[in-house]
Image (cartoon, rainbow, N blue to C red):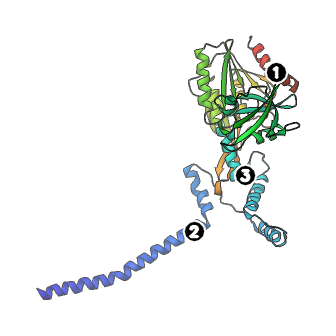
Amino acid sequence: MTEGTTKVTEHVAKHRRAKRPLVSSFLFIIIAVTAALGYVAGMYHYQIEAAIGPVFGYKAHSGSIDFSSLQQTYNSLAANYDGKLDTSKLIQGANNGLVAAAGDVYTIYMTPTESTSFNNSLSGNIGGGIGAEIGLKNNKITVLKVLDNNPAKTAGLAANDIVLDINDQSTSGWTVDKAVGSIRGDKGTTVKLTIQRASEVKNYTITRAIISNPSVTSSVVDGVGTMTITRFDTETGNLARIAAQDFKKQSVKAVILDLRNNGGGYVDAAKDVAGLWLNNRVVVTERVDGKIKDTLRTGNDAILSGIPTAVLVNGNSASASEIVAGALQDHGAAKLVGEKTFGKGSVQQLLSLTGGAQLKVTIARWYTPNGKNINKQGISPDIAASLTQTDFDNGIDPQFDAAKKLLGL
């Protein structure tokens, strides 16, 4: 028994000794193969992405650029420049120049800071402010509108208040951008405004707060529903439908859709807005190299269908605004009133880059339902009407009046 046990034990021990080199060899091979695959993936990841990308629905490019001249430029700059170089800014500048050289004004590189600002603008989050729309009226910085439930409204500011001073600095000769930039600031900080209202001059110290400016506002006056859309963001479709439901509830006899000075936004939001008037109709087609790649259609709940509608547009109505205007015009659902639109007939996509930067790149051209690309041409209104600075200063709106006249109001 003892001898048998000894022989079995010796056999198992020999077997284990024989397996060790084999297991070690396999382990070495696995590590080597893994390392090799990692090296290949690192060296050729763009080529790999280009090969498998279409399977997962995204694009990738496998080409490369000779950056040796850029390195040479940097070396010469670093060796001779009398000052300190910020390499992160140099890299951002190089990225910006590379993208700008594509020659498309809508294809741009955005730094992390610019990306944050851009994303906030589309979400309606403008950061710290007081919740007032500022403009130039009679060559004076003026409050055009105050937003409900925001600091300006709470403090008592009102439309047509003239802003004489901001933080004890006269606004005489200021641009609107300079005034807005001075009023905005970090949440919780204060801004001092000197306001003139008629013959009264009064000082206000207002604490800034995070301002969320909705993209859609609406009203009903004398049976006419007016819907103003300032941009097409992620909430626009829902907000526009709520406004439309209110119009239906109040049995409006006509609708005026104001898209003036609306620079655009998301295409899907434009589709949703057009769908308030159009049932299962083409809103826009997207084409790449002239071939249709995507067709956007509305749903089947056009609650404003059949209600006489006029759309106000001007030279600053662009992109998604033009998609809505073009679709409603082509399908005969509305008449356009105002001025020729901006003329932006391309579609952009946002791509995330390292460190929070973004690339906004043109991926397609869009066409109206009747097959027209309005790039650099714009959409001509059915009824031409202008709004001059003098009109604005005097508080009159000939374009709005023309829309009412068109609707028989």
Q: Where is residue 209 in the image (x, y as percent from the top left)?
A: 65, 39
Q: What residue type is labelled 2?
A: Val
Residue sticking out furthest to the bottom: 3
Task: Report how far apart the C-alphas of labels 2 and 1 lie in the structure.
Answer: 68 Å
State left or right for residue 397 relative to residue 38.
right
Task: Report how far apart the C-alphas of labels 2 and 3 lie in the structure.
Answer: 29 Å
- Tag shown at residue 109: 3
Evaluate if marks 2 and 3 touch, with contact meaning CB atoms under 8 Å apart.
no
The residue shown at (23%, 85%) is 11
Above or below: residue 136 compared with residue 59: above
Evaluate if marks 2 and 1 touch, with contact meaning CB atoms under 8 Å apart.
no
Question: Observer-nearest residue: 338 or 16?
Answer: 338
Figure quadrant of residue 270 = top right
- Tag shown at residue 111: none
Mark 1, other Cα within 10 Å: few <14 / some 14–19 / many ≥20: few
The residue shown at (16%, 84%) is 5
Mark 3, other Cα within 10 Å: few <14 / some 14–19 / many ≥20: many
Of label 3 and label 1, which has the lower sequence position?
A: 3
